[in-house]
Image (cartoon, grey):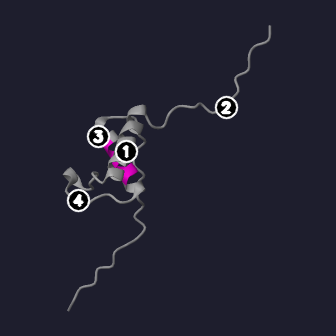
């Protein structure tokens, strides 16, 4: 009897984002279209105008709920601030 070969070339298709995460993103985008989505902590900021910002807020809400969402991308600190003292 011949043993079955496992194909290592095929990638496993697991979800990066859970269904709950996609629901919260969908909800956030819908709220932004209606004009009820606000930015900032506690919705104290202004209205969200860009689609990207709406998706980011939706993902952030999903993270808070504990949904399966990849971690935020770390920003590299390549820029240095120059501190000039006034005299």
User: Residue at point 50% right, 33% down?
Assistant: 15
Q: Compared to 20, does 27 lie above or below?
A: below
Task: Answer left or right for 61 relative to 8.
Answer: left
Foreground label between 4 and 1 = 4
Q: Which residue is mark 2?
A: 10
- Res. 11 image quadrant: top right
Q: Compared to 40, does 18 lie above or below?
A: above
Quarter holding the C terminus is bottom left
* Mark with earlier residue (1, 2): 2
Q: Are marks 3 and 4 in contact (CB under 8 Å)?
A: no
Q: Secondary structure at mark 3?
A: helix
* Mark with earlier residue (3, 4): 4
Q: How many marks?
A: 4
* Mark with earlier residue (1, 3): 1
Q: Which residue is mark 4?
A: 45
Q: CA–CA distance between discs 1 and 3?
A: 9 Å
Q: Which residue is mark 3?
A: 64
Q: Which residues are magenta?
A: 54-61
Q: Which residue is mark 1?
A: 59
Task: Answer left or right for 12 relative to 28.
Answer: right
Q: CA–CA distance between discs 2 and 3?
A: 33 Å
């Amino acid at each position: 009897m011949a043993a079955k070969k496992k194909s290592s070339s095929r990638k496993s298709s697991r979800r990066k984002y859970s269904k709950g995460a996609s629901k919260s993103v969908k909800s956030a985008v819908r709220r932004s279209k209606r004009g009820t989505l606000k930015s900032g902590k506690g919705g104290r900021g202004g209205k969200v105008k860009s689609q990207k910002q709406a998706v980011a807020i939706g993902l952030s809400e999903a993270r808070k709920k504990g949904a399966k969402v990849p971690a935020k991308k770390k920003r590299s600190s390549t820029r240095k601030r120059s501190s000039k003292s006034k005299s």
